[in-house]
Amino acid sequence: MAHAKEQGTFLGHPKGLYVLFFTEMWERFSYYGMRALLVLYMVDFFKMTQEDASGVYKWYTSLVYLTPLLGGFLADKYLGNKWAIVIGAIMMSAGHFLMVFEEMWIFYAALGFLIMGNGFFKPNMSVQVGRLYPQNDPRRDGAYTIFYMGINLGAFLSPLVCGTLRETPGLGYHWGFGAAGVGMVLGLLVYLFGLPWVKELPEGAEYHAPDEDTSASGSHDEDHAMTEEEATSAPSVFPSFSRLSPGIFLMFGGMLFLGSPVAWQLKLVSFDNFIALEIAAIAAFFAAWILSKLAMATRDRVLAIYALFVFVVFFWGAFEQAGNAMNVWADQTTNRYVTETPPTPDVYPEAYVDVAEEGFGTVLKGALAKLVAINPVLTTSFQSINALAIVCFAPLFAWLWVFLARRKINLSIAGKMSIGVFMQGMAFALMIWSVKYENQPSQATLTQLPTRVVSIEDGKLNFYDTPSLDKKEDFEKYVADELPEEGMIAHGGRLKFDEGTATLHISGVLNNNHRDRMLRATAPKTFVEAIHALAQKTKDAEAKAKESGEESFEVVERIADMPPGFDAEYLKGYDPEKLRYDAETQTFFSKMALADKDYKQILVAGSDPEFRTALNEIYVASAKFRVSSWWLFWFYILCTLGELCLSPVGLSMVSKLAPRRFATMLMGMWLLTSFFGNFTAGLAGENWEKLDPNTYFMYIAAAMFGASFVCFLIVKKVTAMMHGVK
């Protein structure tokens, strides 16, 4: 351990702080850049359903807040902060670069590396900032403010850079993920080369300002919160509940632990939810154990933390829609042309661009043009609004709390958090208003519904999705015409067929991914079987080529019974050297192993031609109802205002109320609120395609307003349980 005089300072702070600032900036650049692309990548590139993509997003964003508990434990017991950070940075770099590869198993492996790497990196970086300062150093708050600016600088830049690469023809998602990997490597290099300046102080180090009169150091203002020593003997404000609270949490945990397996077996909850409920049970046991070690006012304070944790979960459940449903809304339903009328959307995929042929310099110029363009702005740029707004508004909020306190308007911690949850509700209420402008009618002629698309109540449409390549059991049922009892509701129930007038009606903007999903469901069964077999042949050919050491292979497959109206324009996004179709001979030529996404894209080309024409007409006609970018801008501003009322206040609450011997454990419990919040966000996102957006936004807004109201009702009681902590 170093002495304070050995650290060296710059602008009044240890030089090591700036090393950590830039390390964290690049790490957050990598995290938020990847997060900005993740759901779009799964839906657009892998052709996943929104439900499946949200399920993956749910676990990824949840587990990055669970593994820090393990990473912190290993660092404390065995590795130390520095080695844990290095290990975490290496694992995350590997994870980002693995995302460059297209294979699905590599994609999941990449997420695993990112989750575990974050577990090592995240808690230890924050702890190391604190260890640069003595316990009573007044510069500590300023240090965390500077560190927080690094987080938000990275979070602001990454969606712009990674999103630009994603939307540049010839580059795409994998370049965006590669940029995130480069950012993480830069963060690792900054840390390794800056380590000589990162000098942690011993635990008992004390701060003494120049010319400080140390004899006065023990004095304090008469108006202060009850100390921890005083709280251990002060009576509880709710003595009966306080005595019963460990048992209540133990019983609650037991009900979850024993009841969730039963609920899963009875198919009342999914396997995902079963695992989450088991984690909640363990958290309840842990909470009960902490309460059992405390008494009197000290137990009250921990109960106050637990009570407010519930509302924090609600908040993050809504806030984290940013990378999920709101990202899809920005991409598909927002008019991103700020000063011009948007062009008519192309019903076909973007044409393949050969970077070598175009010239890398030309492609790079195109990327730079997209970065600064406002017609259209990048889909991912909306996720930079939050970070920029935090930098702008955080000093204002810090001043506001002091200003109100000086005028004896002391908003309690619980009061501030209730405002934060309310502001999040206001953000989604604003989106309900935006749907009013999006929910406009379009129609197209359609004489009859194709196979596997059925009309249900009020003309709403259900369709039966084509099974994925890797779902063998589902494919066998499909071949045997064993369709599920319930199909997928089309366009959230807003797409209807009127048999009497032979028209297809829609309200709102048709999502092109949802359109393609409906289309491939109408491909003839014989064609689906043929393309399924073709995909398997290409995989077998690739495996044989690898075994024999050959550099390339080609599968040539003639399909005699091609569906009428097969449209090869849907394949123009592929390199013709890798995949092409010859219409004269009805033959596919493939020098690549066809993945699930390729199989699904070919099925769109072979979909029912009349239905395809009708949906494409509606897709083009409904595009003019895409809503202004300003709706999302103000949505993210309101989200940020809510975050500033809740997130910094929550961190401060835990540090002030937690007993010293349980401070780290309760900070870990704080991270668990983000785990459950992100899990809740993913659960909501799984229903994005099943509900119309008005209902979706209304449910979330109602949940936020309800939670805010309950939080407001218990403000006085929770504040009393804090015993003087403001």
Image (cartoon, rainbow, N blue to C red):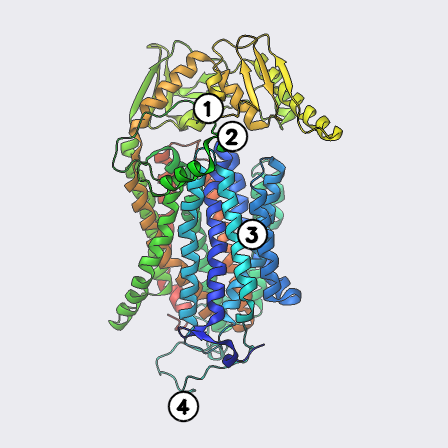
Looking at the image, tell me whether mark 3 or mark 4 is earlier in sequence order. 4
Q: Name the element at disc 2.
A: loop
Mark whose residue sits in front, 3 or 2: 2
Looking at the image, tell me whether mark 4 or mark 1 is earlier in sequence order. 4
Looking at the image, tell me whether mark 3 or mark 1 is earlier in sequence order. 3
Q: Position of residue 479 (x, y in %)?
A: 62, 16
Q: Is residue 305 visible?
A: yes
Looking at the image, tell me whether mark 3 or mark 2 is earlier in sequence order. 2
Q: Name the element at disc 3.
A: helix
For the residues bearing labels 2 and 1, Cβ distance under 8 angstroms: yes
Q: Name the element at disc 1.
A: helix
Q: Is residue 489 above or below residue 254?
A: above
Q: CA distance from mark 4 to mark 1?
A: 74 Å
Q: Is residue 10 above or below residue 246?
A: below
Q: Position of residue 349 (x, y in %)?
A: 44, 25
Q: Is residue 241 visible?
A: no
Q: In the rendered image, which residue does mark 4 sit on? A: 213
- Say few, some or many: other residues with alpha carbon within 10 Å of mark 4 (under 14 / 14 to 19 / 20 or more): few
Image quadrant occupied by the N terminus: bottom right
The image quadrant of residue 635 is: top left
Q: CA distance from mark 3 to mark 4?
A: 50 Å
Q: In the rendered image, which residue does mark 1 sit on? A: 516
Q: Position of residue 217 (x, y in %)?
A: 42, 87
